Image (cartoon, coloured by chain):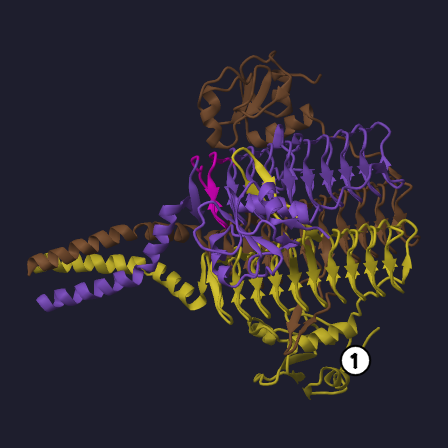
Chain colours: A yellow, B brown, C purple
Amino acid sequence: MIEFSLGQISKIVDGILEGDEASIITDLAEIQHAKEGQLTFLGNPKYRKYLSITKATAILVPKDFSSFYKNLIRVKNPNLAFSLMISCFRPTPPLPNPGIHKTACIAESAKLGENTYIGPNVVIEDKAVIEKNVSIFANSYIGAETQIKSESVIRPNVTIYHNCQIGSKVLIHSGVVVGSDGFGFVRTEKSIKKIPQAGRVVIGDDVEIGANCSIDRGTLGDTVISKGTKLDNLVQIAHNVKIGEYCFIAAQSGIAGSSTIENGVTIAGQVGVAGHLKIGAGAIIAAQSGVSKDIPPGTIAFGYPAQEQKKARREIANIRSIPDIKAKLKEVEKMIKGSK
Amino acid sequence: MIEFSLGQISKIVDGILEGDEASIITDLAEIQHAKEGQLTFLGNPKYRKYLSITKATAILVPKDFSSFYKNLIRVKNPNLAFSLMISCFRPTPPLPNPGIHKTACIAESAKLGENTYIGPNVVIEDKAVIEKNVSIFANSYIGAETQIKSESVIRPNVTIYHNCQIGSKVLIHSGVVVGSDGFGFVRTEKSIKKIPQAGRVVIGDDVEIGANCSIDRGTLGDTVISKGTKLDNLVQIAHNVKIGEYCFIAAQSGIAGSSTIENGVTIAGQVGVAGHLKIGAGAIIAAQSGVSKDIPPGTIAFGYPAQEQKKARREIANIRSIPDIKAKLKEVEKMIKGSK
Amino acid sequence: MIEFSLGQISKIVDGILEGDEASIITDLAEIQHAKEGQLTFLGNPKYRKYLSITKATAILVPKDFSSFYKNLIRVKNPNLAFSLMISCFRPTPPLPNPGIHKTACIAESAKLGENTYIGPNVVIEDKAVIEKNVSIFANSYIGAETQIKSESVIRPNVTIYHNCQIGSKVLIHSGVVVGSDGFGFVRTEKSIKKIPQAGRVVIGDDVEIGANCSIDRGTLGDTVISKGTKLDNLVQIAHNVKIGEYCFIAAQSGIAGSSTIENGVTIAGQVGVAGHLKIGAGAIIAAQSGVSKDIPPGTIAFGYPAQEQKKARREIANIRSIPDIKAKLKEVEKMIKGSK
C-alpha cells in the first residue's frame, strides 16, 4: 500500500503545510468524494462549495486561499501539484518490454532502433524508420518511408500513411489516422476530379493526439502540428493546416484546409475554423464557435459566426432585450396617441 | 421464403386486425415504397401523406388511428410492432460459432469463459477476463486487466484499453475506443504538463456504443455509462463523465469532462455539453445545442447557448420580428413629426 | 529529377502561354512560398495579394486574368490545371503489387478476382466477393457476403460489415466503418428495445470516403451513397439516408436517418441535417448550419436553424442593428417629452 505523510507530500509538491505533518494520506479523491485519509485539491473555484462537506484529510489549495481547513497545503498551482501526487499514488502502468512480436509484419527495408516494442499484428511498410525506445501497439499500421522518432508511443489500431514524420515523445491514441488524403477535388462540368495529395504530415515532439482524430496529408507541402500541442479526441485537421507550438484543441473541433493556428492557441470543443484563416498566437476560441474570419493574437472569440467575446456577449444581451424594446415602443405609441 | 398471414401477424404484435386475416404478407417495406404483399407501419405522422399512394397489403397503426385502409392492425406502439416483425422477416445473421481463431494472441494470464468467440488477430492482454458467450470480432484489442461480462459483442477493429469494465449484453461497434487518456493537462509557463489519467471506464449492462465513438478513462475515478444507455456513432465522452441509465446520445455529440447526465436523458445529434455540468433526469436536448449551464430534470432545451425550448423559440421569433420593430419605429417617428 | 519547360506545361494543361516557353520548371509550390524554377497557380482570389511577393517562374491563371507577370499560362480552370501538374511532378506512389499476404484470413467461400492485393491480417468473411484489381490494405475487415467491385482501394484498418455493396473505383480511407447498425430503438415504459437493422449499405462507383467516417446500414432498405460523391473525414451517415451523385460532404457533417440528399449538393463542414428531410439538387449548405427543414434545389442555406442565405445574413444584420434601434427609440422618447 502506498502512503505518504503530509510532511512528505508538502516537500514533493513544494508547498507550505498548514496542519499536521505526521498525518498519513493513503489515496487521492475529488473534493466531493474525498474521505478520511485522502488528499484532494481545489483547482476550479466551482468546487469551493464542497469545502463544507468534504471528508478529505488535507487539501491542496492556491497560495492566497482564504478559508480555514484542518490541513491545507498551499501551492502555486493546485492542479499541477495534484497531478504530481497522482503519479505518486497511481503510477502509470509501464510500457511493454522491448521486443518484436512474432506476428508483426515488418518490411525488410524498414529500420528499427534499439529497444523498440512492436506489438502483435503491427505492419511496418518499406523503408519506414522507427527510432529507439518507440512502442507500437497491436494492429497498428506504419506506411512506407514514415519516420517515428525516439520514445514515441503508438496505441493499438492506429494508422499512419506513407511518408509522414512523427516527432519524439509523441503519444498517438487508438483509432487515429495520420496522412490520409486531403479533401481536394475540382468540380468539372460532368464530374469531380481528385487533386493528388502529394504532401506529408509532420508532427513535432511531445505532441499528444486523442482517439479517432484524423489528420490529412498536405497537397504539396506539409500539414504541420508543432511541438507540445495536444489534440483531444475526434479532431479533424485538414490538408495544409499549420498548428503552432503548445496549442490545445478540444474534442470534435475541426480546422479546415490551409488555415494557420499560431503558438499557444486554445480551441475548445466542437469549434469549426474555416479554410485559409489565421488564428493569432494565444487566442482562445470558445466551444462550438464557427470561425469565419482571422482572429487577432490574444483575442477571446465566441459565437457563430465567431467574434470577439465581449461583442458576442453584448449581441446575446441585445437579443434578449428585444421584448423590452417592444414594450417601450408600445409605450411610446400610447404616449403619442395620448398627446394627440 | 418467409410468409405470415395477417391473422398470425396480429397475434405476434398483440394487435387488433381490421381486415382479412387470411391475407399473406411476404415482406416488409417503408410506407412510401410498400407493394402488394408487404406490411408497413405508420409511426412518424409525417409519413401519413403516403397513405394515399402506398400499395401495402396491411399497415400497423396506432390504436386511435382514424383513416380507412383495406387492412389495418391497431397496436399500442407501431414502431415496436414493426420492429418485432423485422426480427421475423429478416432474422439477424447469427453470431459466429464459439471458438478461438488460431491467429488470436491471448495472454496466458487472461481468462476466457465458456463458449466465447475470439476472431482472427484479436489481441487480449495480461489478466483480461472475458466471460462466457462473449464474441470478439477480428482485429480488436482488449487491454490488460479489462473485464468483459457475458453475452457482450465486440465488433471488428475495436480498442479497449487496460483496466476497463464492460457489462453484460453490451454491443460495441467497430472503430470504438474505450479507455484512452482523458484530455487532462496543466499549462505551465514554458510548456504543458500531462495529468496522469489513472481511472477506468465502467460500462453497464445492455449498453450499445456506435461506430467510432471515443470514451476516455477517468482521471482518478471512473468514466461511467450506465445500464441500457445507447450511444450513436462518433460520440465523444470525456474523462469522469457519468451517464445514467437508459439515455440516448445521438451521433457526433460530445460530453465534456466531469459532467453528469442523469437517467433517461435524450441528447440529439451534434450537441455539446460543457464540463462540470448536470443534465437532469428525463431532459431532452435538441440537435446542435450548446449546453453551458445545468439543465433541470424534464426540461426540453435548445439553442446556442442552450435554454429552455420555449424561451429559445421566443428568442428566434423576437429576432425575426426586428424588421417589424423597425417599421413601427419609422411610423412612430413620422407620427411625431406630423404632430409637430 | 523531373522537369518540364513552360512550353511543355502549356500543352499538358491546354493553356495559352504569355512568356518564355523555354523556361524550365522543376517543382510546384503555393503562391506565397514559390521560388525561382517553380510553377504556381491562382485559384482562390484571396491569394492575389501574394502576386507582388511570389518568386514563381510562372503562374497558372484564369483566362481573363488581368495583371502582368513575367510568365503566365492562361487556362480554363487553374485548380484543375495545377492538379494535373501535381500528377506530373509528384506521381502518386503506386498501389502494392497484386498478391495475397500469408497472414490474411480469407474464408473458403469468399471469391477473389484477378490481380487483387490483400494485405497482412486482412480478414474476409464467408461468401464475400472481391472483384479484380481491388486493393485491401492491412488489418481491414470485410464482412460476410459483402461485395467490392473492381479497382476499389480499401486503406488499412477499415471495417465493412456483412452484406454491403461497394462500387468500382471506390476509395475508402482508414478507420472508416461501413454497415454498422443504425441508431434505431424504441423507448418502452421500462427500458429501450433495439430495432433490428436488416438493410444494407450500397456505395456507387467513384465514391471517396474520408478517414474515420461511419455509415450505418439501412433498417429495411439500403443506405445509399451514389456515384462520384465525396465524403471528407469523420462524417456520419445514418441509416436509410440516400445521397445522390457527385455531392461533396465536408468533415464532421452528419446526416440523420432517412434524409435524402439529391445530386450535386455541397455540404460544408460540421453541418447537421435532421432526419426525414430532403436537400434539393445543387443546394449548398454553409459550414456549421443546422438544417431542420427541407431545402429547395439550388438554394444556398446557412444558419442555425438554417435558412436561405440572404435571409440568414439579413437576420445577422438585424441583430447587429439592435443598438441603433435602441438609440433611435431613446431619441423618439426625448422628442415626445420635448413636444409635451
Q: Is residue C277 magenta?
A: yes
Q: Is residue B67 visible?
A: yes
Indicate the quadrant where residue B255 lies.
bottom right
Q: Which residues are magenta?
A: C276-297
Q: Is residue C15 left or right of residue A75?
A: left
| x then y, percent, for residue C96 | 80, 42
The kind of residue on which mark 1 rests is: Phe
Q: Quadrant of the C terminus of chain C?
A: bottom left
- Of A122 and B122, nearer the camera is A122
Q: Which residue is mark 1?
A: A4
Indicate the quadrant where residue B56 lies.
top right
Q: Is residue B280 visible?
A: no
Q: Residue at x 57, y 43 (%)?
A: C80
| x then y, percent, for residue C92 | 71, 46
- Of C124 and C20, nearer the camera is C20
Indicate the quadrant where residue B133 lies.
top right
**Magenta stretch: dominant SS?**
loop
- Of C208 and B58, nearer the camera is C208
Q: Is residue C253 above or below residue A89?
A: above
Q: Residue at x 48, y 29 (%)?
A: B47
| x then y, percent, for residue C309 | 40, 46
How many neighbours does mark 1 have within 10 angstroms: few (below 14), some (14-19), or many (20 or more)?
some
Q: Is residue B208 magenta?
A: no
Query: Mark 1 — on which chain does it sit?
Result: A
| x then y, percent, for residue A40 | 68, 75
Q: Is residue B9 left or right of residue A188?
A: right
Q: Residue at x 79, y 64 (%)?
A: A149
Q: Is residue C119 above or below residue A283?
A: above
